[in-house]
Amino acid sequence: MPPRCTHCGLRASGAFQQLASSELGFIEDFRTATERVPAGHPLIREQADAGRLYTLYAGWAFRYKTLSDGRRQILNFLLPGDFFGLQQRFSEGATYGVESLTEVSLCVFRGARLWELYAAHPRLGYDLTWLCAREEQMLDENLLTTGRRSALERVAVLLIHLFKRAQRVGLVDAGNSFAFPLTQQHMADALGLSLVHTHRTLRRLQALGLYVLQDGHLVLRNPKALVQLADYAAQPLAQVPLL
């Protein structure tokens, strides 16, 4: 990871909104550390209060909640540029956990300085509000998926949604292929399906010629067909805030 925010590879990618030099300087001062964490490592533990906020610089992670018997619901997947940890500032400890899906690189911020961000740089405060609103929008979509979509539609919407998000941050190549670290268990936990049902649905979509998953890479053969099947409202790949 670059030591200075001015050398940030994410900001240079064109996927994120540009900031004034004073705002970028504040974020660099706001950042307390950078970390590299291996796959399968907890980044936030449920009910813990580490008081830290994060931007995912590289890699994949996921946010989840568990029941007392170990059953898990994956709430959403985190890709480069995603900001997380804010909810624990408004409750007694984190109401969810976050785990690295692959090896990840993180920018770490001190939550105690959050009010300073709002007071000194209102535009950054607005950006933070925008990111929270987008998170709520994605959770609304996830609730619709688990509550009303069929198994076929659920899997289709997950594939196209992750494809679009990966495409926005430059992880998809010209052949519609990108590294896909999710297991079928991750997908089942995200979609509220059994592992067997998830497996059967994936095989059905593959038989329809809509995707190929091989050697950890997902290739979408017909993204438009997946969008139509999932009844997915695809958003334009516009620039978004980055903290």
Image (cartoon, grey):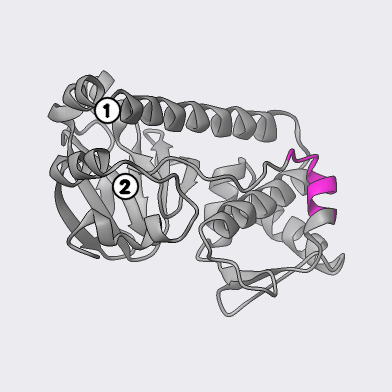
Q: Alpha-carbon distance for marks 1 and 2?
A: 15 Å
Q: Secondary structure at mark 2?
A: strand
Q: Amino acid at mark 2?
A: Thr
Q: Quadrant of the C terminus?
A: top left
The reply, left or right, for residue 117 in relation to residue 74 is: left
What residue is rendered at 41% in x and 42% in y? 63
Label 1 sits on a secondary structure element that is helix
- Part of the protein shown in magenta: 225-233
Q: Quadrant of the N terminus?
A: bottom left
Looking at the image, residue 202 sits to the left or right of residue 186; the answer is right
Q: Position of residue 42 (x, y in %)?
A: 27, 51
Judging by the rendered image, the residue that carries numbered circle 1 is 88
Residue 60, image quadrant: bottom left
How would you classify the magenta stretch by its main secondary structure? helix
Q: Position of residue 65 (x, y in %)?
A: 41, 36
Residue under circle 2?
Answer: 55
In the rendered image, residue 231 lying in the magenta stretch gets the answer yes
Q: Amino acid at mark 1?
A: Gln
Residue 45 lies, in percent from the top left, at: 25, 41
Identify the residue at image location x=51%, y=32%. 134
Q: Residues within 10 Å of mark 2 (few under 14, many from 20)?
A: many
Tell me which residue sits at (87%, 65%) in the image: 208
- Quadrant assignment, res 37: bottom left
In front here: 51 or 16?
Answer: 16
